[in-house]
Image: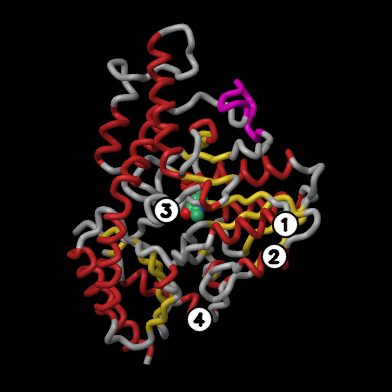
Amino acid sequence: MTTPVYLDYAATTPVDPRVAETMAGYLTLDGIFANPASRSHMLGWQAEQAVESARRQVADLIGADPREIVWTSGATEADNLALTGFLRANRHRGRHLVTSVIEHKAVVDTAEALEAEGFEVTWLTPGQDGRVTPEQLREALREDTVLVSLMAVNNELGVIHDLAALAEVAHTGGAAFHVDAAQAVGRIDLDVERSGIDLMSLSGHKAYGPKGVGALYVRRHPDIRVEALIHGGGHERGMRSGTLPTHQIVGMGEAFALAGAEGEADQARITALRDRLLAGLADLDGIHRNTLVEAAVPNILNLAFEGVEGESLLMALRDIALSTGSACNSASVEPSYVLKGIGLPRPLALASLRFSFGRFTTEADIDRALSALRHALTGLRRRAI
Ligand SMILES: *Cc1c(COP(=O)(O)O)cnc(C)c1O
């Protein structure tokens, strides 16, 4: 059996070998394994130094102060801490949150849980391109709106939000601005100052770092308050207790430093790969671009193949690792809520695949995917007639 071509970088990326090598130095007896909270010996201080140096690497990539970075177990936890922690800490000021129907489940499900807790949520429906406009946001703001949460880059479509414009509207309305930037690191320029971001969720494993680590950026000026969700030893200035996983944190720091140094070059190469895939399909009929390519990161491309079912296509493409975004249970296949959210007709939503590329994707990978895809499409469409 040949190894499948991996075109599912939006689900997770492999750890960069340079990152893995760095991490290996923080696990065993001959490495820096001590508890970074141990104050009574040098081994603890060394671990603490490694954690603080990684905190600076993450802060540097987004134009933040290291003291504004709170380590978490991933972007899911960061989203939970941003929404729940902020709304609970600011409930005296208002109870209203504005977000969109195509956010990641970590935001959608948290917002629903907050609704059950008595907070109020306005769910914006983006345009067909997947973007919420500043005008739409302005209309949704209320006297009691305290927080707006919108993602930087949508994980199924790749579309990029105009963060600076949205932040300005939120601030004018007196609300804080949270951004889920899990898919944005190394793909677009992220600067919390220039874009006016108050809270930002980050993940290690979407940017060639390890799984199980992330961070929440929490602005200090003006002071943004979040209530802790996890209580314990008072780590991370009381916002998130728990012994810090030094190896994970060092890995995320190194991955973010590489994103800063190589992200732009990566994206230029990936743009050419994305265009190679599009060019290789150009002569086929009935291919609909769900991704507005001009407004999206080049590493995510969502396409609908008219007249076929995404699940059958996926089955026929066993040698290509990619995703449909749809949720399966045994009884039925439901189209992706993101594709539904942008108003894509159900048959097209069910005929959609997400291709996502990354640092280690080659031209040969694209060519293998193209030939498998063309073969599968011809077969499935012939059968459908
Ligand atoms: C992957 C992802 C998450 C979840 O991140 P984890 O670190 O896996 O918890 C959240 N938001 C977006 C947009 C993502 O792509």
Q: Circle 3 sits on which residue?
A: 189
Residue found 64% across the figure and 27% down from its top: 231
Q: Circle 1 sits on which residue?
A: 173
- Alpha carbon of mark 4 to alpha carbon of mark 1: how far? 39 Å
Q: Could you say where residue 379 lies in the image, as x and y percent from the top left? A: 29, 83
Visible in this render: residue 118? yes
- Counting residues from the start of the chain, the first of labels 4 and 2 encountered is 2
Q: Main secondary structure of the magenta part?
A: loop
Where is residue 266, by image quadrant?
bottom left
**Magenta span of residues:** 228-238
Q: Amino acid at mark 4?
A: Pro
- Alpha carbon of mark 3 to alpha carbon of mark 1: how far? 25 Å
Q: Circle 2 sits on which residue?
A: 138
Q: Could you say where residue 185 lies in the image, as x and y percent from the top left? A: 41, 50
Q: Are marks 1 and 2 in contact (CB under 8 Å)?
A: yes
Quadrant occupied by the C terminus: bottom left
